[in-house]
Amino acid sequence: MAKQSQVPLAAVIKPLATLPPDETPPYLVDHGEGGPIRCNRCKAYMCPYMQFIEGGRRFQCSFCSCVTEVPPHYFQHLDHTGKRVDCYDRPELSLGSYEFLATVDYCKNNKLPQPPAFIFLIDVSYNAVKSGMVNIVCQELKNLLDYLPRENPEVESVVRVGFVTYNKVLHFYNVKASLAQPQMLVVSDVSDMFVPLLDGFLVNVNESRLVIESLLDQIPEMFADTRETETVFGPVIQAGLEALKAADCAGKLFVFHTSLPIAEAPGKLKNREDKKLIGTDKEKSLFQPQVSFYNTLAKECVAQGCCVDLFLFPNQYVDLATLGVVPVSTGGSIYKYTYFQAQSDQERFLNDLRRDVQKLVGFDAVMRVRTSTGIRATDFFGSFFMSNTTDVELAGLDCDKAVTVEFKHDDKLSEETGALMQCAVLYTSCSGQRRLRVHNMAVNCCSQLADLYRNCETDTIINFFSKYAFRGVLNNPTKAVRDTLINQCAQILACYRKNCASPSSAGQLILPECMKLLPVYLNCVLKSDVLLPGADVSLDDRAYLRQLISCMDVADTHVFFYPRLLPLVSGSLPVAVRASEERLSKGGVYLLETGLHLFLWVGASVQQELLQNIFGTPSFSQIDSILPVCPPRSPPLSSGLQLMVVKQEDRAELIFRHFLVEDKSASGGASYVDFLCHMHKEIRQLLS
């Protein structure tokens, strides 16, 4: 059935997801010095699916069927149904998600971890200073130091901080509490990076506050008249990594960077942007890093638990496909503000930065997905590093990162027992505690195609397909990737048509109820900027989107590929309409959200009253095109999107139209109706 239907089996897992306000955080279970109770053979963690036998003295693993002795301190009698009498007092026997306190055996080099550190590395080249970026970062960091991540809001954060500025040389700062003024130490030999000071580089914020504030006030002044335009990038990450090594801790580097690193140094890059390669067999090389230096560096970062977040402020090509290697391999994030201007982009950047610094994050993480016999995790998509086939290694793992896991059906399954999955993540919390977070899930199995097609989740399938396709462009021409997607979806729908649909004329397209939207969403993936770029989409944009998608959860990919279009009506909550130009009425105002952008489309004949309410002016011609608004509460991607006002018949309408995904796109992407006809043809061909 799995082969015949071609429906993929995948799970999208967000191990440290933010909880809804009404849920309690996962319970922390302490099994004592011996550490968490586990199956002897497959090493699955104690969970509600383990079967206790022989009066409670042993348990049988539901993943691999091996029998393990229960340690004396964990023994408990069973009731008449074979359940332990303490079952509901123990989170690991009654809940789907919980945490274990990890013992020293679960720690690197068998010693308990130090609290993590945050290092801020700021590009102070000419462009960085001129755009206002340096000034904004320094001012904001003064406030943000009070909001470093902590698990208990009452206690101050144990995260230590350090500061570096750079252009083609690096400046380290000693901000030791006992100093009257910060001290700058310059390392100009970037080919052999070292940290010129041990004591006074990583400090406690409260002890060194005055020195740090003095430094952050001085940096913009020090470099105000700089003429240095060249930057390095490799040595910057090396510097942060060396500092974490010296302090023997994990942590995160926040790199604020502006340009292609062309200065003489390790990791130096050349401009290889070549529009002529787009659409050819050589296009894939543009998505691959141009040097192997960063892959090696990424591996070293992961070994140290050094996660890198990159904030980019480019005015031209910066080769994001290469610069992104370390952030993507270490579980980091990339933020991009092309043609950054302080006035219009400041709010969006600050919202991203505030959230990025404050959000809960774990370090030095390893994730393992175990399954019961019959299915096996075979492929993983996301921001991480893998040195073997089973362990997903994450130098950093935050609350927004999702990992998509594909399973293969490789052994007998039965409808009686179903199938089990257990995702375990070993990590160091931001307070420096080593823990295991465990998520368990039991799913039903079926032997009838009709049951399968009744229970598919289209949004999850699209999340998987988009990640599969976006990874595919590294090794295949984009056209081949698009054709593969169309073909697999045609097979999924043809199999339904052949085996489950009631016989009717071949002229009809019949879709399963839960897959009615598969074609519309698939079309959005096919004509996305990564797979079918318009002439105005840069290589860096495509590399950025490719990396952004890789760690999105289902809600994020949903609104990213099919934006929300909401007509604004006075006095009532808006209901989304289909993303097509024919849904726009001249007399209306519409909000369009993609998770990355927010547009307000204003029809040419909107009532004056509505204009007055929204813009504070009754006149269509006086509407300003940028409103700096931030939605008070919204999903992680839209944590403060800048609102762009688009007036009907305006030049900006071209950008807005790009997101009306049911219409034909400028890059040659099909309209939904045309694509549906194309799919129907493909299905008919497969059936005949």
Image (cartoon, helix red, strand yellow):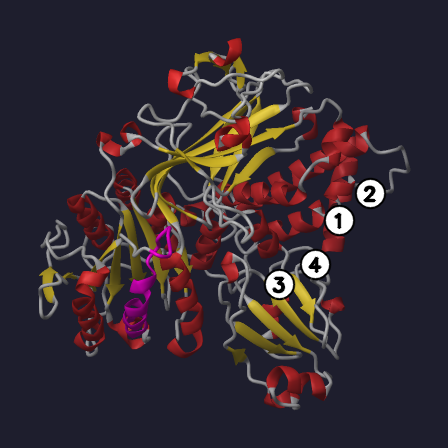
Instruction: Decide which of 497, 361 is in the foreground and name it.
Output: 361
Give SS at disc 3: loop
At x 60%, y 60%, the residue is 667
- Which residue in the structure is indicated by mark 2? 509
Residue 273 at x, y percent in the picture: 39, 57
Mark 4: give few (<14), some (14-19) or many (20+) Cα within 10 Å. Answer: many
Using the numbered discs, state the Cα–Cα distance from disc 2 to disc 3 in whole angstroms. Answer: 26 Å
Q: Is residue 623 left or right of residue 108?
A: right
- What type is the residue that disc 2 sits on? Leu
- Which residue in the structure is indicated by mark 3? 659
Q: Earlier in the sequence, mark 4 or mark 1?
A: 4
Query: Mark 2 and 3 residues: CB-CB less than 8 Å, in contact?
Result: no
Of labels 3 and 1, the one closer to you: 3
Residue 273 in sight from this viewpoint = no
Q: Earlier in the sequence, mark 3 or mark 1?
A: 3
Give SS at disc 2: loop
Query: Mark 1 and 2 residues: CB-CB less than 8 Å, in contact?
Result: yes
Give SS at disc 1: helix
- What type is the residue that disc 1 sits on? Leu
Q: Is residue 214 above or below residue 670?
A: below
Magenta stretch in the rendered image: 134-154
At x 44%, y 57%, the residue is 539
Q: Is residue 357 above or below residue 62?
A: below
Numbered badge on residue 662: 4
